[in-house]
Image: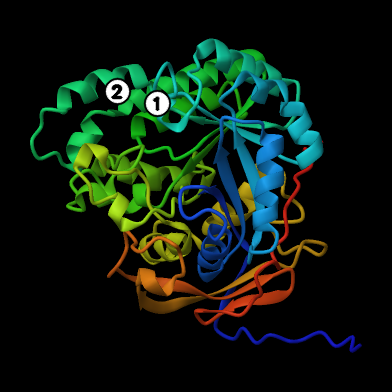
Amino acid sequence: MSDTIPVIRADGLHAFPGLIDAHVHFGFGEKITEYTTETVYAAMGGFTSILGYFLNNESYSDVYEREQEYAKARCHVDYAFHFSVAKEEHVRDMAHYVRRYGVTSFKYFMNFKGEEGRYLGLDGTDDGYLYNLLATASKLPGVKIVCHTENIEIVNRLRQAAQTIEMPTLKDWANVKPPVTEAEACIRVMYLAELLGAHIYIPHISTRMALDEVRRWRKRYPHVYVETCPHYLTHDEDSDLGSIGKANPPFRSKDDVEAMWEGLHDGSIDTVASDHVPRKRATKERPFWLASQGFPGTATILPVLLSEGYHKGRLSLSRIAQLLTEAPARIFDMAPRKGSLQVGADADITLVDLNRTQEVRSEALGSYSDYSLYDGWRLKGWPVRTILRGQTIMQDGEIIGAPGFGQYLARPLAN
């Protein structure tokens, strides 16, 4: 066997550590085969690792064993799991999940109070449940509680009044979930986290009001991490996408969009992740209030940040790399294996052509989903080669890695 190390020419390209998408949803596309399609999609976007959420009303020991059987033979990129806690047994078994499966992050939906989660078969929870969850997490140093911040009681009252609108728009959707519903929930969970000593991660932050509260709170309690998503950088409530653009949180005001860019620049936002949901377009093209929420996003994260961020003078290349590699690896216990180009890391590398301008075509990106928010957009700056653990898995828009090459990432807790 030859010991010759292949030399890859990267003239004119920029080398990033392999990109990490810390916010992907499993189970909303086509079960089983989504481990192929959505990891192809990730590799096409320069991503070498993804962290996927599960939301189940059963033991996660059962979920883990079942999903691993699907994933291990199909994934093109490395993958890890977040477990969403929705039952008393989920909190009781957290320490077991950490030790047995290397899962160190657990999501809690603050909006699943009372009956809100029933459509998913979930038990209703309350602030007492959240208090116990944070108290339990505080005894597992380094565990992150990912909190969807939304005051559903205000939303429900506003949504009920809005049901009479004959031709609702994305602005009407934003109006039933105004910024205070995100900001107030941020304050509540940050207060409890500080009181109990828990570490929290706020996903998909979307408003200036909420971000300002985070900035204030961090002056007294540093263990708060924040994520935003590409669509909160590029779309606002005046978008004409109709139900295609329906998300939770909704698209916000133009000022909120600017606030997200400011947060990325000044460091008050730690990561950018997709909140990727591989739904078909047909699930969106329903009467507005019944249309599904969320959309695909992983493969276009980097082109959006390069085209709308770097090339427009909003972000440096080093900051983009930090947002998509170092920060998620550090926060979610994947460092030093992931998130850097240091000796001893996994040799995950994303080669990028900063000057390549390309039109987004969803059908060329490989997802089970059949559309993109960015279809037809011409974005400048694209990944041209994705290297996972030293092996090229995507080159010039073609997948050349084998399914099953991706490995499960058990995440040891930071000391």
**Tag 1 residue:** 150
Residue appearing at x 89%, y 89% in the figure: 2
Residue type at numbered disc 1: Glu
Badge 2 or badge 1: first in the primary sequence: 1
In this rendering, the answer to whether 330 lies above or below 375 is above
Placement of the C terminus among the 4 image quadrants: top right
Q: Do the numbered discs 2 and 1 sit on residues whose CB atoms are within 8 Å?
A: yes
Residue appearing at x 25%, y 46% in the figure: 236
Residue 347, horizontal then vertical, whole percent: 74, 68
Residue 164, horizontal then vertical, whole percent: 11, 28
Placement of the N terminus among the 4 image quadrants: bottom right
Residue appearing at x 34%, y 61% in the figure: 372
Residue appearing at x 35%, y 72% in the figure: 361
Q: Nearer the viewer, residue 387 or 335?
A: 387
Work out which residue is located at the far top of the displayed protein and give it: 128
**Tag 2 residue:** 155
Question: Which quadrant of the view contains residue 107?
Answer: top right
The tag on residue 333 is none
Residue type at numbered disc 2: Val
Q: Nearer the viewer, residue 100 or 158?
A: 100
Instruction: Determine whether, in the image, residue 340 is placed left or right of residue 256.
Output: right
Instruction: Determine whether, in the image, residue 231 is placed left or right of residue 218.
Output: left
Secondary structure, mark 1, is loop
Residue 263, horizontal then vertical, whole percent: 44, 42
Mark 2 neighbour class, 10 Å CA radius: few under 14, some 14 to 19, many 20 or more: some
